[in-house]
Amino acid sequence: MVNMQEIILTRRSIRKYISEPITKEQIEHLLKAAMYAPSARNEQPWHYIVINERNILNKIIEAHPYANMLKEAPMAIIVCADENIEKTEGYWVQDCSAATQNILLAAHAMGLGSVWLGVYPREERISAIKTLFKLPENIQPLSIIVIGHPNEQKAMPERYLKNRIHTNQW
Ligand SMILES: Cc1cc2nc3c(=O)[nH]c(=O)nc-3n(C[C@H](O)[C@H](O)[C@H](O)COP(=O)(O)O)c2cc1C
């Protein structure tokens, strides 16, 4: 049984990878974790683009200003929202963020490294990804998740701030 608190606290953004590929089973495991995220009215408005072809990963490096780690990483998943599925307007950002976080945590629990690259709400990044993947008008990319076998280790920082906690009043 994994210790969930330990997984949450020790997950870090990994930006150095070895080139070893991620197996089909591992990818399925990550996508399943994503699809079990909570979503407003359980609408599950997401789609996932799995990218493991080197020439397409290289094109993402050109489309996103902070995606250089994709030179080494073997794969990425783009989390997108389908605005046609969404009935509760505006919640897709939170739904797809929850799905993104599930993938980051599941990857870490499997011994893999990952990093969340922000796409939404940066107009130039949204438009570059929409063009690169020929996304339909109703599909909005929220994040690119880089995934691979880590080639760096990061210490757990201290982040527990008691002055951010308010009990019963501000
Ligand atoms: C919405 C969002 C966008 C992010 N965009 C990027 C990015 O474009 N490039 C990057 O290297 N890291 C990106 N990150 C990762 C953050 O830099 C990282 O989570 C933060 O520094 C905390 O470090 P940790 O993930 O190791 O705890 C993003 C994270 C979030 C939540």
Image: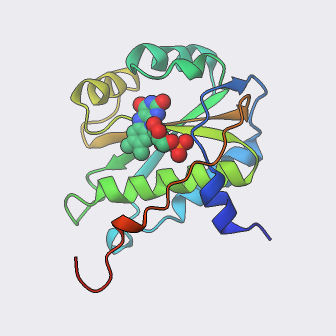
x, y percent for residue 136 = 30, 36
Against 78, is 73 above or below?
A: above
Among all residues in the image, which is located at the extreme left? 89
x, y percent for residue 74 = 67, 26
Against 24, is 18 above or below?
A: above
What residue do we see at 37% from left, 59% from top? 95
Question: In the picture provided, is 166 more to the left or to the right than 56?
Answer: left
Q: Nearer the viewer, residue 162 or 140?
A: 162
Q: Quadrant of the C terminus?
A: bottom left
- Answer whether residue 133 is visible to the viewer in this image: yes
Q: Nearer the viewer, residue 87 or 57?
A: 57
x, y percent for residue 120 = 30, 39
Q: Quadrant of the N terminus?
A: bottom right
What residue do we see at 66% from left, 48% from top? 107
The chosen color scheme is rainbow
x, y percent for residue 37 = 49, 64
Quarter of image, ligand 1: top left
Against 124, is 148 above or below?
A: below
User: Which image quadrant for residue 14?
Assistant: top right
What residue do we see at 34% from left, 58% from top? 94
User: Which image quadrant for residue 33?
Assistant: bottom right
How many marks on residues? Answer: 0
What residue do we see at 61% from left, 16% from top? 71
- Answer whether residue 39 is visible to the viewer in this image: no
Among all residues in the image, which is located at the extreme front? 163
